[in-house]
């Protein structure tokens, strides 16, 4: 499948894996790559402690890696936090920011997320900003209001188009994450188009080049239908990214 914008297939491993399972997963993905002619970028997001191992395993491959989160401060007395600079030192290309698990379980506000996205971008990392509504919000007809607020709080904080051009968006409806429920391609497309429209208000060129990924129970069996939609530029994949064959089959959609 060919797309207007360079697609991305990203794997969010969350808090999963051991040194051993990660070796196996990566080696299995790597062994299949030469047979695949996908034009998508592949990025994996391991837990922090495995970044060094992953950087060695993926060195000299086309697969990139990133952090699942970053600190909102540059450095100092912030026990348990990981800075943008540390991620860069381990070769990270990008970083997830504002994943719904961070927002819901760790109380990350739109303002904190905005600060992190700005800092990531200033440090030369590509922030993947995650937005999405809960089931309650969707049922109350608030999807657009919620995602617009999540997006615009961040864009307001950024200094101009250059900074914004680093940002990759991920629409991840909270009700579809890890639940086996997937947004239909039409439901997802509607929100993706709306998000792009929000960026268009600021800058038309920026909006047309911004990648917007879909996340929420993406599997090999539903990926092609989702990725065929005009404004869906790839996926952020949780559960299915821990299975080399599933993940590769999702990546193959872009052959
Ligand atoms: P899932 O997770 O694919 O397991 O639903 C997606 C995500 O949280 O990024």
Image: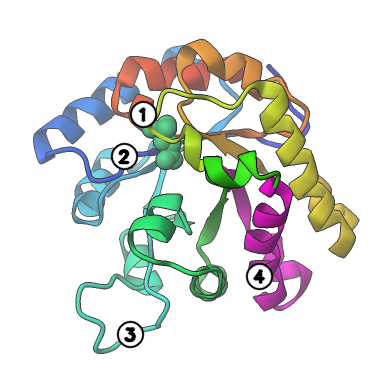
The first of marks 2 and 4 along the sequence is 2
Q: Are marks 1 and 2 in contact (CB under 8 Å)?
A: yes
The location of residue 61, given as percent across then percent down, is: 39, 36
132 drawn magenta: no
Q: Quadrant of residue 89?
A: bottom left
Indicate if the residue with disc 1 has its beta carbon within 8 Å of ligand 1: yes
The quadrant in which the C terminus is found is top right
**Local secondary structure at mark 4:** helix
Distance from the alpha carbon under mark 3 to that under mark 4: 24 Å
Distance from the alpha carbon under mark 2 to that under mark 4: 27 Å
Dot 3 alpha-carbon crowd within 10 angstroms: few under 14, some 14 to 19, many 20 or more: few
Question: Which residue is drawn at the image coordinates 66% and 60% (left, top)?
Answer: 151
The first of marks 3 and 4 along the sequence is 3
**Local secondary structure at mark 2:** loop
- Residue of label 3: 75
The first of marks 1 and 2 along the sequence is 2
- Magenta residues (range): 142-171
Work out whether residue 172 can be spotted: no
Which mark, by number, is residue 13? 2
């Amino acid at each position: 499948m060919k797309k207007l914008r360079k697609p991305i297939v990203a794997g969010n491993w969350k808090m999963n894996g051991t040194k051993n399972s990660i070796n196996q997963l990566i080696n299995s993905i790597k062994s299949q790559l030469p047979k695949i002619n996908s034009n998508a970028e592949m990025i994996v997001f391991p837990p922090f402690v495995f970044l060094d191992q992953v950087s060695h395993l993926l060195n000299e491959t086309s697969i990139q890696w990133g952090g699942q989160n970053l600190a909102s401060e540059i450095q100092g007395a912030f026990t348990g936090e990981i800075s943008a600079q540390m991620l860069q030192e381990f070769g990270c290309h990008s970083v997830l920011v504002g994943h719904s698990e961070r927002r819901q379980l760790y109380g990350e506000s739109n303002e904190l997320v905005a600060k992190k996205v700005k800092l990531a971008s200033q440090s030369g990392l590509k922030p993947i900003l995650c937005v999405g509504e809960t089931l309650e919000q969707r049922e109350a007809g608030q999807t657009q209001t919620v995602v617009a607020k999540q997006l615009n709080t961040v864009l307001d904080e950024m200094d101009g188009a250059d900074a914004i051009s680093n940002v990759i968006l991920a629409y991840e409806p909270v009700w579809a994450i890890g639940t086996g429920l997937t947004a239909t391609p039409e439901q997802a497309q509607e929100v993706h188009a709306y998000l792009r429209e929000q960026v268009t208000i600021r800058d038309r060129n920026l909006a047309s080049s911004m990648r917007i990924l879909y996340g929420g129970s993406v599997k090999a069996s539903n990926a092609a239908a989702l990725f065929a939609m005009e404004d869906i530029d790839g996926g952020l994949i949780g559960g299915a990214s821990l299975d080399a064959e599933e993940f590769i089959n999702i990546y193959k959609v872009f052959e």
